């Protein structure tokens, strides 16, 4: 690798070499090399050598230290050495032997590639290689020339002295930088074999250089990073361009893994073919470990944050449920207390009313008997005394006889009305019923309307509200009667409040019921009031949300109604409204609900 770089530094162009001034003998050697090299002999460039003549057969071996003539499979056909050499294995050199057996594996692979390239392109291929000989390093230049008979001539020349002098020309500075750099500099063949690694590989990764050169690059890479490195190497091989930095793990000799960052550059020959890749690797193990530790901490923090967020959300949901449960409990307690109060009042009213209602009939009978007796006295005791006649005129007996039955009938009607109100109060409170019962939904709606009758009637400051009932044929529904009555009261109260907000000529509340399916009913309560805008409509079922002034509402009526219908009865409660188009609340519940334990 160093020989090739030094030769490139010394080449001013492809046709001439800089001749060091230190040795005239070396200059003549370079002339011989230039004669043998196709880059200097333009007549051989890109051409194929004819079948060697006797003169050529005599000349070609003289141009190099070692001369081979081989067939396309690398079999040695002819061999000649001009002087002692130490850059190939002499024991395996003989006609009929394989040329590849004369070299170490990494160099044999390079010869194999060069032979294939000569066969494919039918042009001259040259390259340089280095060998460790004891404590020294020998440098050699190889040239492969195609022959028309499909044979290949291989010329080897020892250029150790040229490289050494070139290093002297350029100084030892470059070699010192490369071999003592913190980065590992390596050369990799297109087949993925290390053909050179800088000496600091031993310091960083523990292996001796001889243990690395000629070995596959993949054998040192972590299995998890192998596909990434393979893709990176393939891209560099296809494009032939310098690649961006890649990070991967390399195995230390002690079995541990070191993180490296590396980038590749392709080195090409005169034909544009890639000869090898130069890689510059930097050890980033410390930084990578810090990065991995930081990522681990960040993952732990994110995980903790997610857990904390989940816990917070759960706490918020629990708090919301507690608020709803508390509000519902308060409202239920209020309704229970109100129901008990209503039931107590109804009971207390019911007793005297029963006295009146039960005795009115008897009083009417007695009065009729008395009237009959008075008629008998008038018929049989004539003439009447002046005092009696005067009293009859004074009390207007004829008017009393006519009006007293009407008074008694009015008392009877009033007592009956009171009895109905008391019954409605008891039905609405349902304090004597627990759990789910089969009830008549229409009866619950009528009871709520009866209790709200005073607000539905005409008032000096407002017009009476017309209630239009369109009841369908509904079966009895299994539900919580008291809770359903609470929902009806809340929805009807909201409708009355909405109609009271604006002046409407004919305020109306329409109540429709229908059987949706064999096991589901629908109840619709619609008013022709001002309606609700979308922003408010989306929040009407939120706890404590109200548009009424302070003291007019708590904002819990619709929220509790929603809980009763959806949670308790597995139903639906929703609102359909547009500003200026009135408001409709729709209840949909099954006729039979299995109560939760």
Image: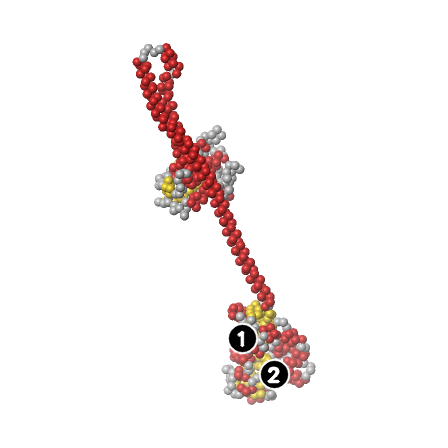
Looking at the picture, tell me which residue is in the foreground, 348 or 374. 348
Q: How many residues crowd mark 1 within 10 Å: few (<14), some (14–19), many (20+)?
A: some
Picture residue at 49% right of the left edge, 43% below the top: 327
Q: Secondary structure at mark 2?
A: loop
Picture residue at 37% right of the left edge, 40% below the top: 439
Left or right of 279 on screen, residue 541: left
Quarter of the rendering containing residue 260? bottom right
Q: Secondary structure at mark 1?
A: loop
Looking at the picture, tell me which residue is in the foreground, 523 or 74. 523
* 2 versus 467 height, above or below: below
* 363 versus 384 height, above or below: below
Percent position (x, y) of residue 313?
51, 51
Quarter of the rendering containing residue 417? top left
State the residue position of label 1: 216
Q: How many residues crowd mark 2 within 10 Å: few (<14), some (14–19), many (20+)?
A: few
Percent position (x, y) of residue 123?
55, 79
Residue extending farthest to the right is 21
Q: Is residue 376 visible?
A: yes
Q: Is residue 470 visible?
A: no
Picture residue at 52% right of the left edge, 78% below the top: 116
* Quarter of the rendering occupied by the N terminus: bottom right
Percent position (x, y) of residue 28?
65, 84
State the residue position of label 2: 134
Left or right of 453 on screen, residue 316: right
Percent position (x, y) of residue 388?
36, 13
């Amino acid at each position: 690798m160093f020989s090739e770089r030094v030769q490139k530094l010394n080449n001013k162009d492809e046709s001439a070499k800089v001749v060091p001034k230190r040795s005239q003998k070396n200059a003549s050697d370079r002339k011989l090399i230039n004669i043998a090299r196709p880059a200097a002999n333009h007549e051989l460039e890109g051409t194929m050598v004819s079948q060697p003549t006797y003169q050529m057969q005599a000349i070609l071996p003289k141009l190099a230290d070692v001369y081979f003539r081989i067939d396309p499979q690398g079999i040695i056909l002819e061999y000649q050495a001009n002087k002692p050499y130490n850059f190939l294995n002499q024991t395996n050199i003989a006609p009929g032997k394989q040329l590849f057996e004369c070299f170490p594996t990494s160099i044999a692979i390079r010869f194999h590639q060069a032979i294939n390239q000569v066969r494919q392109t039918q042009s001259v291929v040259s390259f340089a290689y280095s060998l460790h000989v004891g404590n020294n390093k020998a440098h050699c230049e190889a040239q492969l020339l195609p022959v028309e008979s499909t044979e290949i001539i291989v010329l080897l020349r020892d250029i150790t002295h040229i490289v050494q002098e070139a290093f002297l020309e350029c100084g030892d500075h470059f070699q010192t930088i490369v071999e003592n750099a913190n980065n590992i500099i390596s050369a990799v063949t297109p087949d993925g074999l290390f053909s050179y690694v800088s000496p600091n590989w031993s310091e960083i990764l523990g292996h001796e250089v001889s243990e690395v050169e000629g070995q596959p690059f993949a054998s040192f890479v972590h299995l998890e990073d192998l596909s990434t490195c393979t893709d990176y190497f393939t891209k560099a091989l296809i494009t032939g361009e310098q690649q961006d930095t890649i990070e991967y793990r390399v195995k230390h000799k002690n079995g541990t893994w070191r993180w490296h960052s590396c980038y590749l550059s392709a080195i090409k020959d005169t034909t544009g073919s890639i000869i090898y890749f130069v890689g510059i690797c930097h050890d980033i193990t410390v930084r990578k470990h810090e990065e991995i530790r930081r990522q681990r901490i960040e993952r732990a923090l994110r995980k903790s944050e997610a857990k904390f967020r989940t816990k917070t959300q759960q706490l918020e949901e629990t708090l919301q449920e507690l608020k709803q449960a508390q509000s519902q409990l308060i409202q239920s307690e209020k309704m229970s207390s109100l129901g008990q109060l209503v039931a107590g009042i109804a009971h207390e009213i019911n007793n005297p009313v029963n006295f009146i209602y039960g005795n009115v009939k008897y009083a009417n009978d007695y009065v009729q008997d008395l009237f009959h007796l008075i008629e008998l006295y008038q018929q049989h005791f004539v003439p009447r005394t002046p005092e009696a006649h005067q009293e009859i005129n004074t009390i207007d007996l004829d008017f009393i006889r006519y009006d007293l039955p009407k008074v008694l009938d009015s008392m009877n009607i009033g007592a009956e009305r009171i009895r109905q109100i008391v019954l409605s109060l008891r039905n609405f409170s349902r304090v004597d019923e627990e759990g789910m019962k089969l009830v008549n939904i229409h009866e619950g709606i009528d009871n709520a309307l009866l209790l709200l009758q005073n607000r539905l009637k005409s008032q000096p400051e407002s017009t009476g509200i017309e209630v239009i009932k369109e009841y369908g044929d509904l079966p009895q529904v299994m539900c919580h009667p008291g809770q359903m009555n609470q929902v009806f009261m809340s929805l009807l109260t909201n409708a009355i409040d909405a109609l009271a907000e604006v002046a409407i000529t004919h305020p109306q509340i329409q109540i429709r019921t229908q059987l949706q399916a064999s096991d589901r009913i629908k109840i619709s309560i619609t008013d022709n009031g001002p309606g609700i805008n979308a922003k408010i409509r989306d929040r009407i079922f939120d706890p404590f949300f109200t548009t009424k002034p302070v003291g007019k509402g708590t904002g819990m009526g619709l929220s509790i109604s929603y809980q009763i219908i959806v949670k308790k009865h597995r139903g639906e409660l929703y609102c359909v409204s547009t500003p200026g188009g009135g408001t409709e609340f729709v209840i949909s519940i099954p006729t039979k609900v299995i109560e939760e334990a």
